[in-house]
Amino acid sequence: MRSVKGALPIALRAKAEDRIGLLVPKDNAAEAAVVKGLQVIPIQNLREAVGFLEGEVKISPTRVDLARLFDQAHEDDLDFADVKGQESVKRALEIAAAGGHNVLLIGPPGTGKSMLTKRLPTILPPLTLEEALETTKIHSIVGLLAPGHALITQRPFRAPHHTASDAGLLGGNVNPTPGEISLAHHGVLFLDELPEFKRSVLETMRQPLEEGRVTISRAAGTMTFPSQFMLVAAMNPTPDGKMPGESRCSPREIQNYLNRISGPLLDRIDIHVEVPAVKFREITAERTGETSAQIRERVVTARRCQQERFAGKRNVTCNARMGTRDLKAFCALDEATLELLKMAMNELKLSARAYDRILKVARMIADLAGSERLISEHISEAIQYRSLDRQLWACGGDSRQ
Protein backbone atom coordinates (compact mmCIF):
# COMPACT_ATOMS: atom_id res chain seq x y z
CA MET A 1 0.00 0.00 0.00
CA ARG A 2 1.65 3.20 -1.18
CA SER A 3 1.16 6.50 0.59
CA VAL A 4 -1.41 8.89 -0.90
CA LYS A 5 -1.89 12.64 -1.04
CA GLY A 6 -4.58 14.31 1.02
CA ALA A 7 -4.98 11.77 3.83
CA LEU A 8 -5.78 14.48 6.38
CA PRO A 9 -8.56 16.14 4.33
CA ILE A 10 -10.03 12.69 3.67
CA ALA A 11 -9.96 11.87 7.38
CA LEU A 12 -11.62 15.18 8.25
CA ARG A 13 -14.34 14.47 5.67
CA ALA A 14 -14.86 10.98 7.07
CA LYS A 15 -15.28 12.43 10.55
CA ALA A 16 -17.76 15.03 9.23
CA GLU A 17 -19.82 12.19 7.71
CA ASP A 18 -19.82 10.34 11.07
CA ARG A 19 -17.72 7.46 9.80
CA ILE A 20 -16.39 5.11 12.46
CA GLY A 21 -12.94 4.59 11.01
CA LEU A 22 -10.63 4.76 8.06
CA LEU A 23 -8.19 2.30 6.51
CA VAL A 24 -5.10 4.09 5.21
CA PRO A 25 -1.58 3.16 4.06
CA LYS A 26 0.78 2.83 7.01
CA ASP A 27 2.79 5.92 5.96
CA ASN A 28 -0.38 8.06 6.15
CA ALA A 29 -1.66 6.72 9.47
CA ALA A 30 -0.10 9.36 11.74
CA GLU A 31 -1.37 12.16 9.49
CA ALA A 32 -4.96 10.88 9.49
CA ALA A 33 -4.89 10.05 13.21
CA VAL A 34 -4.70 13.71 14.25
CA VAL A 35 -8.48 13.78 13.69
CA LYS A 36 -10.03 13.00 17.05
CA GLY A 37 -12.86 10.47 17.30
CA LEU A 38 -11.86 8.53 14.17
CA GLN A 39 -10.26 5.07 14.23
CA VAL A 40 -7.36 5.10 11.79
CA ILE A 41 -6.23 1.61 10.81
CA PRO A 42 -2.72 1.40 9.27
CA ILE A 43 -2.58 -1.06 6.35
CA GLN A 44 0.61 -2.45 4.78
CA ASN A 45 -0.97 -4.53 1.95
CA LEU A 46 -4.33 -5.55 0.53
CA ARG A 47 -4.22 -9.00 2.14
CA GLU A 48 -3.97 -7.30 5.54
CA ALA A 49 -6.89 -5.01 4.68
CA VAL A 50 -9.12 -7.97 3.72
CA GLY A 51 -8.10 -9.87 6.85
CA PHE A 52 -8.99 -6.90 9.06
CA LEU A 53 -12.39 -6.37 7.42
CA GLU A 54 -13.22 -10.09 7.77
CA GLY A 55 -12.17 -10.09 11.41
CA GLU A 56 -9.27 -12.47 10.91
CA VAL A 57 -6.53 -9.89 11.61
CA LYS A 58 -6.47 -7.51 14.55
CA ILE A 59 -4.84 -4.12 13.97
CA SER A 60 -4.70 -1.48 16.66
CA PRO A 61 -5.73 2.04 15.58
CA THR A 62 -2.94 4.58 15.29
CA ARG A 63 -2.91 7.19 18.03
CA VAL A 64 -1.19 10.57 17.98
CA ASP A 65 -0.44 12.68 21.04
CA LEU A 66 -1.15 16.22 19.78
CA ALA A 67 0.05 17.83 22.99
CA ARG A 68 3.41 16.11 22.65
CA LEU A 69 3.74 17.23 19.04
CA PHE A 70 3.29 20.88 20.00
CA ASP A 71 5.40 20.59 23.14
CA GLN A 72 8.39 19.18 21.32
CA ALA A 73 11.21 21.72 21.41
CA HIS A 74 12.17 22.97 17.98
CA GLU A 75 15.84 23.77 18.03
CA ASP A 76 16.59 26.38 15.39
CA ASP A 77 20.06 26.71 13.98
CA LEU A 78 19.20 30.30 13.10
CA ASP A 79 18.94 33.09 15.67
CA PHE A 80 18.65 36.86 15.54
CA ALA A 81 21.57 37.05 17.97
CA ASP A 82 23.80 36.01 15.04
CA VAL A 83 23.00 39.22 13.15
CA LYS A 84 25.44 42.07 13.81
CA GLY A 85 23.90 45.54 13.92
CA GLN A 86 20.74 46.28 11.87
CA GLU A 87 18.76 47.11 15.01
CA SER A 88 16.26 49.24 13.08
CA VAL A 89 15.55 46.35 10.69
CA LYS A 90 15.15 43.92 13.58
CA ARG A 91 12.67 46.34 15.13
CA ALA A 92 10.68 46.46 11.88
CA LEU A 93 10.64 42.65 11.63
CA GLU A 94 9.47 42.37 15.23
CA ILE A 95 6.55 44.70 14.47
CA ALA A 96 5.77 42.70 11.33
CA ALA A 97 5.88 39.35 13.16
CA ALA A 98 3.67 40.62 15.97
CA GLY A 99 0.99 42.03 13.67
CA GLY A 100 1.27 39.78 10.59
CA HIS A 101 2.36 42.70 8.41
CA ASN A 102 3.95 42.50 4.95
CA VAL A 103 7.52 43.82 4.71
CA LEU A 104 9.80 45.14 1.94
CA LEU A 105 13.55 45.25 2.66
CA ILE A 106 15.51 47.60 0.41
CA GLY A 107 19.30 47.71 0.45
CA PRO A 108 22.54 46.94 -1.42
CA PRO A 109 23.80 43.35 -1.74
CA GLY A 110 25.61 41.97 1.29
CA THR A 111 23.73 43.99 3.90
CA GLY A 112 21.96 40.94 5.34
CA LYS A 113 18.48 41.09 3.80
CA SER A 114 18.25 37.32 3.26
CA MET A 115 20.01 36.57 6.54
CA LEU A 116 17.45 38.62 8.48
CA THR A 117 14.47 37.20 6.62
CA LYS A 118 15.50 33.57 7.17
CA ARG A 119 15.46 34.26 10.91
CA LEU A 120 11.96 35.74 10.87
CA PRO A 121 10.22 32.36 11.52
CA THR A 122 12.19 32.04 14.77
CA ILE A 123 10.27 34.97 16.30
CA LEU A 124 6.80 34.13 14.98
CA PRO A 125 4.20 32.88 17.49
CA PRO A 126 3.55 29.11 17.51
CA LEU A 127 0.78 27.66 15.39
CA THR A 128 -2.57 26.94 17.01
CA LEU A 129 -4.12 23.52 16.42
CA GLU A 130 -6.62 24.99 13.95
CA GLU A 131 -3.82 26.75 12.03
CA ALA A 132 -1.69 23.59 12.06
CA LEU A 133 -4.56 21.54 10.60
CA GLU A 134 -5.19 24.09 7.83
CA THR A 135 -1.50 24.25 6.95
CA THR A 136 -1.07 20.47 7.03
CA LYS A 137 -4.09 19.95 4.75
CA ILE A 138 -2.55 22.13 2.04
CA HIS A 139 0.85 20.45 2.22
CA SER A 140 -0.85 17.05 2.28
CA ILE A 141 -2.81 17.47 -0.94
CA VAL A 142 0.33 18.68 -2.73
CA GLY A 143 2.27 15.68 -1.42
CA LEU A 144 4.83 17.64 0.59
CA LEU A 145 4.15 15.93 3.91
CA ALA A 146 6.91 13.45 4.77
CA PRO A 147 5.85 9.78 5.21
CA GLY A 148 4.91 9.09 8.82
CA HIS A 149 4.74 12.81 9.62
CA ALA A 150 1.59 13.65 11.56
CA LEU A 151 1.26 17.42 11.61
CA ILE A 152 3.07 20.60 10.62
CA THR A 153 3.68 22.41 13.90
CA GLN A 154 6.03 25.14 12.65
CA ARG A 155 5.01 28.05 10.47
CA PRO A 156 6.02 27.41 6.84
CA PHE A 157 8.70 29.46 5.12
CA ARG A 158 8.50 29.42 1.31
CA ALA A 159 11.07 31.11 -0.91
CA PRO A 160 10.27 30.55 -4.62
CA HIS A 161 12.83 31.56 -7.24
CA HIS A 162 12.17 34.69 -9.28
CA THR A 163 11.65 32.52 -12.39
CA ALA A 164 8.45 31.11 -10.84
CA SER A 165 5.40 31.18 -13.13
CA ASP A 166 1.87 32.34 -12.36
CA ALA A 167 0.82 28.72 -11.76
CA GLY A 168 3.82 28.07 -9.54
CA LEU A 169 3.11 31.07 -7.34
CA LEU A 170 -0.70 31.13 -7.28
CA GLY A 171 -1.46 27.51 -8.15
CA GLY A 172 -3.05 25.93 -11.17
CA ASN A 173 -2.05 23.18 -13.62
CA VAL A 174 -4.71 21.03 -15.32
CA ASN A 175 -6.27 20.05 -12.01
CA PRO A 176 -6.28 23.10 -9.69
CA THR A 177 -3.60 22.63 -7.02
CA PRO A 178 -2.21 25.07 -4.43
CA GLY A 179 0.75 27.27 -5.31
CA GLU A 180 3.46 28.88 -3.20
CA ILE A 181 1.15 31.51 -1.71
CA SER A 182 -1.09 28.77 -0.31
CA LEU A 183 1.83 26.61 0.83
CA ALA A 184 2.91 29.69 2.83
CA HIS A 185 -0.51 29.86 4.54
CA HIS A 186 -0.04 30.94 8.20
CA GLY A 187 3.66 31.42 7.47
CA VAL A 188 6.10 33.48 5.43
CA LEU A 189 6.43 33.92 1.67
CA PHE A 190 9.87 35.32 0.88
CA LEU A 191 10.40 36.90 -2.55
CA ASP A 192 14.08 37.74 -2.94
CA GLU A 193 15.11 40.09 -5.76
CA LEU A 194 11.50 41.28 -6.07
CA PRO A 195 11.94 43.30 -9.31
CA GLU A 196 13.31 40.18 -11.04
CA PHE A 197 9.90 38.48 -10.82
CA LYS A 198 7.69 38.94 -13.85
CA ARG A 199 5.41 41.90 -13.32
CA SER A 200 2.41 39.85 -14.42
CA VAL A 201 3.21 37.29 -11.70
CA LEU A 202 3.47 39.98 -9.02
CA GLU A 203 0.23 41.65 -10.10
CA THR A 204 -1.71 38.40 -9.66
CA MET A 205 -0.78 38.49 -5.97
CA ARG A 206 -2.68 41.70 -5.27
CA GLN A 207 -6.07 40.11 -4.67
CA PRO A 208 -4.79 37.21 -2.49
CA LEU A 209 -2.83 39.71 -0.38
CA GLU A 210 -6.02 41.67 0.22
CA GLU A 211 -8.49 38.82 0.69
CA GLY A 212 -6.35 36.03 2.19
CA ARG A 213 -7.48 33.46 -0.38
CA VAL A 214 -6.94 32.63 -4.04
CA THR A 215 -9.47 31.23 -6.53
CA ILE A 216 -8.19 29.14 -9.43
CA SER A 217 -10.45 28.37 -12.40
CA ARG A 218 -9.59 25.59 -14.84
CA ALA A 219 -11.52 23.33 -17.19
CA ALA A 220 -11.51 20.65 -14.47
CA GLY A 221 -13.22 23.01 -12.05
CA THR A 222 -12.82 25.98 -9.74
CA MET A 223 -11.04 25.75 -6.42
CA THR A 224 -10.45 28.31 -3.65
CA PHE A 225 -7.41 27.89 -1.43
CA PRO A 226 -6.51 29.89 1.70
CA SER A 227 -3.47 32.18 1.43
CA GLN A 228 -3.09 34.17 4.62
CA PHE A 229 0.65 34.67 4.65
CA MET A 230 3.22 37.29 5.54
CA LEU A 231 4.86 38.61 2.39
CA VAL A 232 8.51 39.49 2.96
CA ALA A 233 10.24 40.87 -0.12
CA ALA A 234 13.82 42.04 -0.65
CA MET A 235 15.30 44.14 -3.42
CA ASN A 236 18.27 46.26 -4.43
CA PRO A 237 17.62 50.00 -4.79
CA THR A 238 19.07 50.09 -8.34
CA PRO A 239 20.03 47.54 -11.03
CA ASP A 240 23.71 47.59 -9.95
CA GLY A 241 22.81 47.34 -6.27
CA LYS A 242 23.95 50.83 -5.20
CA MET A 243 21.84 53.62 -3.76
CA PRO A 244 20.48 56.04 -6.43
CA GLY A 245 23.04 58.78 -5.64
CA GLU A 246 25.95 56.32 -5.98
CA SER A 247 24.71 54.20 -8.87
CA ARG A 248 26.32 54.32 -12.30
CA CYS A 249 23.01 53.42 -13.92
CA SER A 250 21.18 56.11 -15.84
CA PRO A 251 17.95 57.58 -14.41
CA ARG A 252 16.00 55.76 -17.13
CA GLU A 253 17.57 52.41 -16.22
CA ILE A 254 16.80 52.97 -12.54
CA GLN A 255 13.24 54.02 -13.35
CA ASN A 256 12.64 50.96 -15.55
CA TYR A 257 14.00 48.74 -12.78
CA LEU A 258 11.79 50.25 -10.08
CA ASN A 259 8.73 50.35 -12.35
CA ARG A 260 8.67 46.56 -12.38
CA ILE A 261 6.86 46.92 -9.05
CA SER A 262 3.54 48.69 -9.30
CA GLY A 263 2.22 51.30 -6.89
CA PRO A 264 -0.85 49.19 -5.95
CA LEU A 265 1.40 46.28 -4.97
CA LEU A 266 3.62 48.57 -2.88
CA ASP A 267 0.53 49.93 -1.12
CA ARG A 268 -0.28 46.40 0.03
CA ILE A 269 3.10 46.09 1.77
CA ASP A 270 2.73 47.62 5.23
CA ILE A 271 6.37 48.18 6.15
CA HIS A 272 9.18 49.45 3.90
CA VAL A 273 12.57 49.53 5.58
CA GLU A 274 16.10 50.35 4.44
CA VAL A 275 18.82 47.80 5.16
CA PRO A 276 22.07 49.80 5.25
CA ALA A 277 25.61 48.44 5.07
CA VAL A 278 26.84 47.19 8.43
CA LYS A 279 29.54 49.34 9.98
CA PHE A 280 32.95 47.81 10.70
CA ARG A 281 32.71 48.37 14.45
CA GLU A 282 29.39 46.47 14.50
CA ILE A 283 30.89 43.55 12.57
CA THR A 284 33.85 43.24 14.94
CA ALA A 285 31.90 43.89 18.15
CA GLU A 286 31.75 40.95 20.57
CA ARG A 287 28.40 42.03 21.99
CA THR A 288 25.46 40.25 20.40
CA GLY A 289 21.92 41.53 20.08
CA GLU A 290 18.76 40.04 21.53
CA THR A 291 18.08 36.37 20.92
CA SER A 292 15.12 35.14 18.91
CA ALA A 293 13.60 33.75 22.12
CA GLN A 294 13.62 37.19 23.76
CA ILE A 295 11.99 38.84 20.74
CA ARG A 296 9.48 36.01 20.32
CA GLU A 297 8.33 36.46 23.93
CA ARG A 298 7.24 40.04 23.15
CA VAL A 299 5.65 38.92 19.88
CA VAL A 300 3.61 36.21 21.60
CA THR A 301 2.42 38.67 24.27
CA ALA A 302 1.34 41.14 21.56
CA ARG A 303 -0.48 38.40 19.61
CA ARG A 304 -2.33 37.39 22.75
CA CYS A 305 -3.49 40.98 23.15
CA GLN A 306 -4.79 40.96 19.56
CA GLN A 307 -6.61 37.66 20.07
CA GLU A 308 -8.47 39.17 23.01
CA ARG A 309 -9.27 42.31 21.01
CA PHE A 310 -10.66 40.40 18.03
CA ALA A 311 -12.39 37.61 19.96
CA GLY A 312 -15.43 36.47 18.02
CA LYS A 313 -14.16 37.81 14.68
CA ARG A 314 -13.36 34.74 12.59
CA ASN A 315 -11.54 36.50 9.75
CA VAL A 316 -9.53 38.90 11.93
CA THR A 317 -6.71 37.28 13.87
CA CYS A 318 -4.11 40.08 13.93
CA ASN A 319 -3.81 43.81 13.32
CA ALA A 320 -2.84 43.39 9.66
CA ARG A 321 -6.25 41.81 8.99
CA MET A 322 -8.33 44.66 10.44
CA GLY A 323 -11.15 46.00 8.29
CA THR A 324 -12.57 49.51 8.04
CA ARG A 325 -14.87 49.08 11.04
CA ASP A 326 -12.03 47.69 13.15
CA LEU A 327 -9.83 50.67 12.28
CA LYS A 328 -12.54 53.05 13.48
CA ALA A 329 -13.05 51.08 16.65
CA PHE A 330 -9.43 50.45 17.67
CA CYS A 331 -7.39 53.19 15.95
CA ALA A 332 -9.03 56.42 17.08
CA LEU A 333 -6.75 59.48 16.88
CA ASP A 334 -6.80 62.78 18.73
CA GLU A 335 -6.65 66.07 16.78
CA ALA A 336 -2.88 66.56 17.06
CA THR A 337 -2.08 63.01 15.92
CA LEU A 338 -4.63 63.26 13.11
CA GLU A 339 -3.00 66.49 11.89
CA LEU A 340 0.42 64.78 11.87
CA LEU A 341 -0.96 61.97 9.74
CA LYS A 342 -2.66 64.44 7.40
CA MET A 343 0.64 66.28 6.79
CA ALA A 344 2.41 63.01 6.02
CA MET A 345 -0.31 61.92 3.61
CA ASN A 346 -0.05 65.20 1.69
CA GLU A 347 3.76 65.41 1.62
CA LEU A 348 4.33 61.76 0.66
CA LYS A 349 1.27 61.63 -1.64
CA LEU A 350 0.10 58.41 -0.02
CA SER A 351 -3.00 56.53 -1.12
CA ALA A 352 -6.07 55.72 0.97
CA ARG A 353 -4.83 52.14 1.25
CA ALA A 354 -1.50 53.41 2.60
CA TYR A 355 -3.43 55.43 5.20
CA ASP A 356 -5.05 52.22 6.46
CA ARG A 357 -1.67 50.47 6.55
CA ILE A 358 -0.16 53.24 8.66
CA LEU A 359 -2.98 52.93 11.21
CA LYS A 360 -2.57 49.15 11.39
CA VAL A 361 1.20 49.38 11.94
CA ALA A 362 0.72 52.18 14.50
CA ARG A 363 -1.78 50.00 16.36
CA MET A 364 0.85 47.25 16.45
CA ILE A 365 3.54 49.61 17.72
CA ALA A 366 1.18 50.73 20.49
CA ASP A 367 0.43 47.11 21.41
CA LEU A 368 4.14 46.32 21.75
CA ALA A 369 4.45 49.38 23.99
CA GLY A 370 1.47 48.23 26.07
CA SER A 371 -0.57 51.32 25.17
CA GLU A 372 -4.32 51.35 24.58
CA ARG A 373 -4.22 54.77 22.88
CA LEU A 374 -2.47 55.72 19.66
CA ILE A 375 -0.21 58.70 20.19
CA SER A 376 1.96 60.77 17.84
CA GLU A 377 5.03 58.67 18.66
CA HIS A 378 3.33 55.53 17.34
CA ILE A 379 2.05 57.28 14.22
CA SER A 380 5.48 58.83 13.50
CA GLU A 381 7.22 55.46 13.57
CA ALA A 382 4.53 53.94 11.35
CA ILE A 383 4.89 56.80 8.85
CA GLN A 384 8.63 56.26 8.52
CA TYR A 385 7.90 52.72 7.32
CA ARG A 386 5.93 54.24 4.40
CA SER A 387 8.29 57.05 3.44
CA LEU A 388 11.29 55.09 2.15
CA ASP A 389 9.65 53.76 -0.99
CA ARG A 390 8.36 57.23 -1.93
CA GLN A 391 11.83 58.75 -1.50
CA LEU A 392 13.46 55.94 -3.45
CA TRP A 393 11.04 56.00 -6.36
CA ALA A 394 11.30 59.77 -6.51
CA CYS A 395 15.08 59.44 -6.86
CA GLY A 396 14.51 56.98 -9.66
CA GLY A 397 12.46 59.54 -11.53
CA ASP A 398 9.04 57.96 -11.09
CA SER A 399 6.21 60.21 -9.94
CA ARG A 400 3.73 57.42 -9.28
CA GLN A 401 0.70 58.27 -7.17
Image: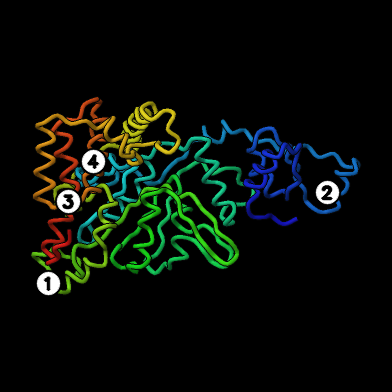
Tell me the quadrant of the picture where the N terminus can be found: bottom right
In this figure, which residue is indicated by the disc labeled 4?
91
Residue 297 in the image, given as x and y percentages of width and height:
34, 31
What type is the residue that disc 1 sits on?
Pro
Query: Mark 2 against mark 3, which lies toward the viewer?
Result: 3
Give above or below for 36 relative to 216.
above
Residue 195 in the image, given as x and y percentages of width and height:
28, 65
The residue depicted at 77 percent of the width and 51 percent of the height is 44
Q: Sequence-wise, which precedes: disc 3 or disc 4?
A: 4
Give above or below for 379 relative to 274.
above
The residue depicted at 84 percent of the width and 49 percent of the height is 48
In this figure, which residue is indicated by the disc labeled 3?
350
What type is the residue that disc 3 sits on?
Leu
Contact between labelled residues 1 and 3, with CB atoms less than 8 Å apart? no
Contact between labelled residues 2 and 4, with CB atoms less than 8 Å apart? no
Residue 319 in the image, given as x and y percentages of width and height:
32, 37
The residue depicted at 64 percent of the width and 42 percent of the height is 12
In this figure, which residue is indicated by the disc labeled 1?
251
In this figure, which residue is indicated by the disc labeled 2?
49
